[in-house]
Amino acid sequence: MHEETVTLARSDADGYEIALRRRLIGDTVTDELIINGTFAMDSARTMSEIALAEALSPEPGHVLVGGLGLGFTADHLLTIGATHLDIVELSGPLIEWAQDGLTPTLARLAADPRVTIRHGDVATLLAGQPTLPGLFGPWDSICIDIDNGPDFLIHEDNARLYTPEGIRAAIGHLHPGGKMAIWSQGPSKEFWYDLTSIDPHATERLVIVERANRRMDYAIYTVHRPE
Ligand SMILES: C[S@@+](CC[C@H](N)C(=O)[O-])C[C@H]1O[C@@H](n2cnc3c(N)ncnc32)[C@H](O)[C@@H]1O
C-alpha cells in the first residue's frame, strides 16, 4: 500500500516549532499537529477532543476556547449549539493556516461567522491581564486544551493555569452557573484534589483511546462557578 508523509506547513515564528503534517496510507488521509518535535494530536482519533466539547453540553452558549489545535473541539462545540466561540491560540502561523484552509476542519472554523480567532495566550488572559483588546468575559463556558495537562507540559508557562490560583481565576471569568472543561493526557491525582477542593461538583471522566497498539487514558475535567 502506498504510504507518504507530507509537511503541509512548519514555523517557529512564535519561539516554538509548530508543524502540520499529512499522512497518506492508501486512501486514508490523516492530519497531524506537531509541537516542538512532539506529536500533539491527529485527525484519526479525536474522541477525547470531542468529549471535551461534550463536557459543556447541553448548552455551551458563548464559549472561550484555548487553543485551536486542529479545531475538532471547537467544531464540535458549534455542532452541539454553541452560540459564539472566542478561540485564543498561541501560534500565529496556525491561525494563518486555518485562514488558508490547510485542513477541512480549520477551513470551516475560520469561515464561520460564529467564530472569532485571536492570537494570544489564554493563560495570560485568564490570569486577568487584558492583553487582547476587546476580548473579555464573562463567558457561559470555558474550554481548555492548550497542553498535555497539569503533569506533563510542553509550554512551562502554561503551568500557572493548572494551579489552584489559576483555576480560581479562570472560574472568575464565567457567568454564575457557568462551566469550564479541561483536557488532560491522563488522570492527575493532585489536579483532581485541587479541583474538588475548589468545587465539590467537579467531575473527572476518562476517555480511553487505542493509539498505535497503546491504550491512552485521557481525562476530561469540569469545574463550575456557583449560581
Ligand atoms: C492539543 S492542541 C488543541 C487541540 C484541540 N482541542 C482540537 O480539537 O484540535 C493545543 C493547542 O493549544 C495551543 N496553545 C498552547 N498554549 C497555549 C496558550 N497558553 N494559549 C493559547 N493557545 C495555546 C497550541 O499552539 C495548540 O494549537
Image: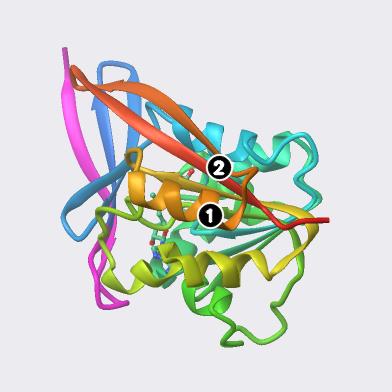
Most foreground residue, 37 or 23: 37
Ligand 1 neighbours mark 2 (CB distance < 8 Å): yes
Element at label 1: helix
Residue at left offset 59%, top offset 83%: 128
Residue at left offset 49%, top offset 39%: 220
Where residue 213 sits in the image (x, y, percent)? 18, 17
Numbered tag placed on residue 197 in the rendering: 1
Residue at left offset 28%, top offset 67%: 155
Most foreground residue, 99 or 171: 171
Q: Distance between the residues labelled 2 and 1?
A: 27 Å
Where residue 115 sits in the image (x, y, percent)? 70, 57
Furthest toward the top, the residue is: 1
Residue at left offset 72%, top offset 36%: 57
Residue corresponding to mark 2: 73
Magenta-colored stretch includes residue 6: yes
Most foreground residue, 8 or 218: 218
Where residue 206 sits in the image (x, y, percent)? 43, 28
Which amino acid lies under the numbered mark 2 shown in the image of this protein? Thr
Q: Which of marks 2 and 1 is in front?
A: 1
Q: Quadrant of residue 35?
A: bottom left
Which amino acid lies under the numbered mark 1 shown in the image of this protein? Ser
Element at label 2: helix
How packed mark 1 is, by other alpha carbons closer than 10 Å (few <14, some 14-19, many 20 or more), is few
Region of the chain picked out in magenta, as a range: 1-18
